Image (tube, rainbow, N blue to C red):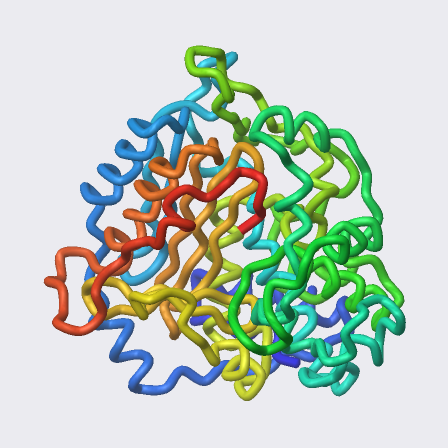
């Protein structure tokens, strides 16, 4: 299983040595990353990020109701950050690109990586029935591990019934602690959405079951497996799985919900168990760590090439053909012809985008500290075009980064 690899010579050599030592501690041998001439040429041709457009997207996000927003872009030319608005309304502290925040469903990609590492180790089969590993959990024996990873299980999303309205629904679960089986039971009370394998239907239930699968297969909590397999080897200093603790330690962004009644003050949603999401959406990180994670994943540092290819086998998720989903990973096809891979995240108080190019050499992490303003999420999505297309004119191919109605107005109740 590939893990941290030698980085280019000085000044990053010491970082590479530290990463290698972490791999040894984790008990996994590092491999050598080979960058093909084609990949190198592609990276060299990538346009510089359009920083004015990046800042405009962030200002559009705050203009749409987010107290603050930030973005961090890595790639040719180094690291670029932009931040607008505030990270804490009570103190007036400015948004800070170094601060931690809740990443919502970007957690799903972490979970998918662990599952696919177990697949590459021969401990799980992608087409194994879930019942082979978790007997008696699901009533349909046709549901496979692959169906969970690509949201084609037909299992209803329990969050659809869990939250009645935004703020009251959040307050009802803010401090609750659920077991995995509690969440699965909520899903099984609802009608199935599709037959297994029939069509894409996004559901947090899928990744709750995958969390159970990780723990059953390894004998360890998911937090330990995230740490041993991803966080430690990549040196992600500000990334953690916090459950059922409610606080974000250290420098962090505070999240806010817009009230159900117009004119009422925003609701601070920062402290919560996120127990309703767990392995589907309970992780905390910062922009730098998300850049590192997406670049490492797409660059081949976390999965063998053949397994990464499986993860990147995509199916369209909407009628435009510009958005697709693989195994715990999204693909967006941008207006300039570039495709980017990663995940979005929505958890009460936070919108997140974490994406990279196919070669992993350019990455974006963007965040806004609200979650029930679809227009703010749409505006934040504009950071993708700014970061990956730069000033390059649109191609005649992909039709650009637009959203279906479901993506425009993401309900805060979902970790997406």
Q: Residue at x 83, y 49 (%)?
A: 182
Instruction: Between residue 122 and residue 93, name the one nearer to us.
Output: 122
Q: Residue at x 68, y 25 (%)?
A: 171
Q: Is residue 26 above or below residue 28?
A: above
Residue 334, position in %: x, y?
Answer: 26, 63
- Answer left or right for 388 relative to 36: left
Label tally: 0
- Point out residue 79 in the picture as x, y percentages from the top left corner: 35, 51
Quadrant of the rendering where the N terminus is positioned? bottom right
Percent position of residue 416, x then y:
53, 51
Residue 243 lies in what quarter of the image? top right
Q: Which residue is drawn at 52% across and 26% down?
A: 257
Direction front: furthest residue: 191
In the rendered view, does 293 fall on the left or right side of 214?
A: left
- Kindly tell me whether residue 4 is visible in this rendering: no
Q: Is residue 185 above or below residue 264?
A: below
Whether 265 is drawn above or below 280: the answer is above
Name the residue rendered at 29%, 85% in the picture.
38
**The quadrant where residue 324 appears:** bottom left
| Residue toward you, 37 or 287 | 287
Give the x, y percent position of residue 249.
Answer: 67, 32
Residue 140 seen by the camera: yes
405 vs 228, nearest the viewer: 405
Question: In this rendering, is residue 10 above or below 354?
Answer: below
């Amino acid at each position: 299983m590939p893990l941290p690899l030698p980085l280019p010579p000085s000044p990053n050599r010491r970082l590479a040595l530290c990463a290698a030592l972490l791999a040894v501690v984790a008990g996994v041998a590092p491999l050598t990353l080979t960058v093909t001439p084609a990949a190198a040429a592609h990276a060299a041709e990538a346009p510089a990020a359009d920083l004015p457009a990046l800042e405009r997207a962030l200002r559009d996000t705050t203009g749409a109701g987010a107290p603050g927003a930030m973005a961090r872009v890595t790639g040719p030319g180094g690291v670029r950050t932009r931040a607008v608005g505030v990270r804490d309304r009570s103190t007036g502290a400015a948004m800070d690109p170094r601060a931690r925040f809740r990443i919502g469903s970007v957690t799903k990609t972490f979970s998918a990586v662990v599952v696919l590492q177990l697949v590459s180790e021969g401990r799980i089969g992608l087409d194994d029935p879930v019942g082979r590993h978790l007997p008696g959990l699901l009533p349909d024996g046709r549901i496979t591990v692959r169906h969970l990873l690509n949201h084609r299980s037909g299992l209803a999303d329990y969050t659809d019934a869990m939250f009645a309205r935004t703020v009251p629904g959040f307050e009802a679960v803010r401090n609750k602690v659920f077991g995995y089986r509690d969440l699965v039971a909520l899903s099984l009370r609802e009608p199935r959405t599709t037959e297994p394998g029939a069509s894409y239907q996004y559901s947090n239930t899928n990744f709750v079951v995958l969390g159970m699968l990780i723990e059953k297969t390894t004998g360890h909590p998911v937090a330990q497996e995230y740490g041993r397999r991803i966080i430690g080897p990549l040196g992600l200093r500000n990334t953690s799985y916090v459950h059922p603790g409610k606080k974000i330690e250290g420098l962090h962004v505070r999240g806010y919900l817009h009230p159900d009644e117009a004119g009422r003050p925003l609701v601070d949603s920062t402290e919560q168990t996120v127990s309703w999401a767990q392995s589907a959406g309970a992780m905390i990180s910062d922009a730098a760590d998300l850049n590192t994670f997406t670049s490492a994943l797409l660059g081949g540092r976390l999965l063998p090439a053949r397994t990464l290819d499986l993860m990147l086998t995509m199916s369209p998720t909407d009628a435009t053909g510009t958005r697709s989903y693989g195994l715990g990973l999204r693909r967006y096809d941008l207006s300039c012809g570039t495709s980017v891979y990663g995940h979005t995240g929505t958890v009460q108080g936070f919108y997140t985008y974490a994406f990279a190019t196919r070669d992993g050499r350019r990455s974006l992490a963007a965040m806004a500290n609200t979650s029930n303003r679809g227009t703010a999420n749409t505006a934040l999505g504009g950071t993708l075009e700014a970061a990956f297309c730069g000033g390059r004119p649109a191609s005649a191919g992909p039709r650009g980064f637009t959203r279906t109605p479901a993506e425009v107005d993401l309900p805060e109740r979902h970790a997406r």
